Amino acid sequence: MRLTCIVRCFFIWLAVVGTVRANNAAGPQTPAKISSAPEPPGITLDWIHVDGPYIALTFDDGPSAKLTPKLLDLLAAHHIKVTFFLIGENVAEHPEIVAREAREGHEVANHSWSHPNFGKMSDESVRSQVRRTDDAIRNAAGVTPTLLRPPYGSVTARQKKWINQEFGYKIALWDVDPLDWKRPGPNVVCNRIVRNTRAGSIVLVHDIHPGSIEAMPCVLNQLEAKGFKFVTVSELLAMETPVPPKPSASPKAAGVRPSPTLASPNN
Ligand SMILES: [Zn+2]
């Protein structure tokens, strides 16, 4: 009698475990980061849904005494506004370039003091990196930044939350990365950006690599020819419209990010 119960219980247990496993297996598309990201919505930006052909070019790690003024000349000739994610150390060294960026209508934003990996640091060290750069930008340009891009995009959900609460910053990542820091040459940088940029894109480039600056005439000409209009990240964010609900949950469509309609700036 007792033995029968043990055997039966064992099979019931097997059935329960099997069901739980099957249910878990039913959701393979669920990104792992959702479960570990208890951040309030709207703190992190990568791509922004907008009604129109608007995009944001962003330039990281500067200013560079040699390259950033060249870039500013080119942007002025095209009447294009971009966003600069600045390294505090470089801001302190070249405040006049940061002042020029702001004066010419570009957005100046925080990219840490010395480019460390926030995800591996204590809160106190992160706070100091953010605070010092915030102060340096305000001193140089007379404006208070509202965006932070953590170096390498590395930041924990918990850090994002307190940085947002303490500094009012949004965390600005990107959706187009030409990997220009690997110095693949200006043509490759240009092609990667032009191929992957769609309405609402935030494009990551670095204004400390000569090849990236050399790629810019090609990038600007080709994106302009495709009908894109250039705004700062904060302007892009201000244009955000709700993403319409997906018509059907076809498993085949899930995970395919750029839809052809969104990719065309003419829609
Ligand atoms: Zn960087």
Image (spheres, rainbow, N blue to C red):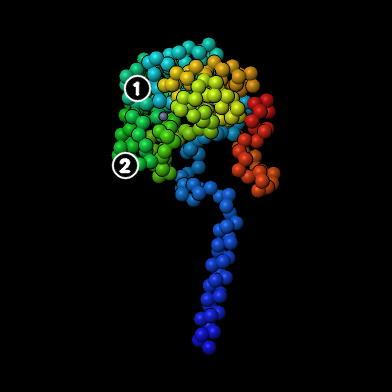
Q: Residues within 10 Å of mark 2 (few under 14, many from 20)?
A: few
Q: Point out residue 87 in the picture as x, y percentages from the top left corner.
A: 37, 26
In-front residue for pair 184/171: 184
Q: How many marks?
A: 2
Q: Residue furthest bottom?
A: 1
For ligand 1, tell me if the residue under mark 1 lies within 8 Å.
Answer: no
Discs 2, 1 touching: Cβ within 8 Å: no
- Does residue 130 lie above or below 12 as drawn? above
- Mark 1 surroundings: few (<14), some (14-19) or many (≥20) residues within 10 A: many
| One can see residue 7 in this view | yes
In which image quadrant can residue 125 be found?
top left
Q: Using the image, tell me which numbered label, if any, was put on residue 122.
A: 2
Which residue appears at 53% of the width and 78% of the height?
A: 9
Q: Position of residue 145 (x, y in %)?
A: 41, 27
Residue in view at x 56 percent, y 33 percent: 48
Comparing 22 with 78, the one in front is 22
The quarter holding residue 162 reads top left
* Residue 211 image offset from top left, x and y in percent: 47, 19
In the figure, 189 relative to 47: above or below? above
Q: Label 2 is placed on what type of residue?
A: Ser
State the separation of the CA atoms marked 2 and 1: 23 Å
The residue type indicated by label 1 comes to: Asn
Q: Which residue is denoted by mark 1 in the rendering? A: 90
Disc 2 is placed on an element classified as loop
Quarter occupied by the C terminus? top right
Q: What is the number of the mark on residue 150?
A: none
